[in-house]
Amino acid sequence: MPEPGQEETLRMVALDLGFHIGCYKCEEGGLLLSSEGECQGCYPLDGHILCKTCTAWQIQELSATVTTDC
């Protein structure tokens, strides 16, 4: 829905989901994401909308649990 007094609204699309600009946030840390600038971009992982920092943290966590044992 457009903001009061506006006829149009902008939205971001990530993982086939539409987000209001103010709702396009990292699911973990709550950082407001943007399509501009690498540091505030979206780095999705396993179907989750994440910032670069949270994606890196999640990958580190997943890597720590991987074993090469048969």
Image (cartoon, rainbow, N blue to C red):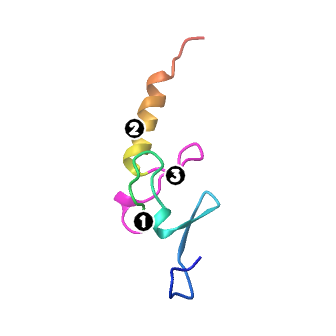
Stretch in magenta: 36-50
Mark with earlier residue (3, 2):
3
Residue situated in front as seen by the camera: 38 or 4 = 4
Q: Which mark is residue 49?
A: 3
Residue 17, compared with residue 1, is above or below; it is above
Amino acid on which disc 1 is placed: Ser
Residue 39 is covered by the magenta coloring? yes
Question: Crowding at label 1, few (<14), some or many (≥20) Cα neighbours within 10 Å?
Answer: some
Q: Secondary structure at mark 1?
A: loop
Q: Which residue is mark 2?
A: 57
Q: Which mark is residue 58?
A: none
Instruction: Give residue 31's quadrant in the image.
Output: bottom left
Q: Which residue is mark 1?
A: 34
Task: Give the position of the C terminus as an image quadrant.
Answer: top right
Q: Position of residue 21 (x, y in %)?
A: 48, 69
Q: CA distance from mark 3 to mark 1?
A: 12 Å
